[in-house]
Amino acid sequence: MTINPKRWHIYIVDLEPRIGTKPGKQRPCLVIQPNEFSAHGLKSTVVLPLTSKIIAGDAFPLRVRIPQDFAGLAQTSDILVDQILAWDNDLFRQEIGALPEHLIDEVKTALKDFLDL
């Protein structure tokens, strides 16, 4: 069954195989693509992977921290802003939760800074 991913929601996505610096395995990913694309039949979705391997200090705009128990996450995680991926919708496994508004704003700012927009 194909999931219709929603923007600013976190899903478990199958990212295998791991290649180079690209995160592998099934892991949480934040959908950043507008809903209109998947609603009109686009078969892939742009995401930012998450990691529970937290680094010390502030890594903004490369990482945005999500505290434990936010957006359905069982542990504190970082959004990997520098690992933007477009992934096939058939590889989305389950929805975890929605990102709170204040973290959406932080991700938007990080993307603008990282992409120099």
Image (cartoon, rainbow, N blue to C red):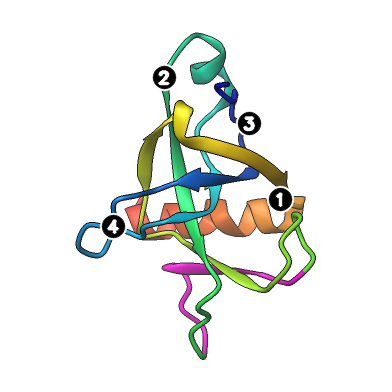
Mark 3 or mark 4, which has the lower sequence index? 3
Amino acid type of the residue tagged 4 in the rendering? Arg
Mark whose residue sits in front, 3 or 4 = 4
Q: Do tag 1 and tag 3 residues touch (Cβ < 8 Å)?
A: no
Instruction: Say which quadrant the N terminus sits in.
Output: top right
- Identify the residue position indicated by label 2 in the image: 43
Of 76 and 62, nearer the camera is: 76
SS category of the residue bearing label 1: loop
Mark 4 or mark 1, which has the lower sequence index? 4
Per the rendering, the mark at residue 18 is: 4
Per the rendering, the mark at residue 6 is: 3
Amino acid type of the residue tagged 1 in the rendering? Leu
Disc 4 and disc 2: Cα gap in Å?
Answer: 21 Å
Of 32 and 110, nearer the camera is: 32
SS category of the residue bearing label 3: loop
- Identify the residue position indicated by label 1 in the image: 99
Amino acid type of the residue tagged 3 in the rendering? Lys
Instruction: Work out whether 113 lies above or below 33.
Output: below
Q: Which residues are magenta?
A: 57-68
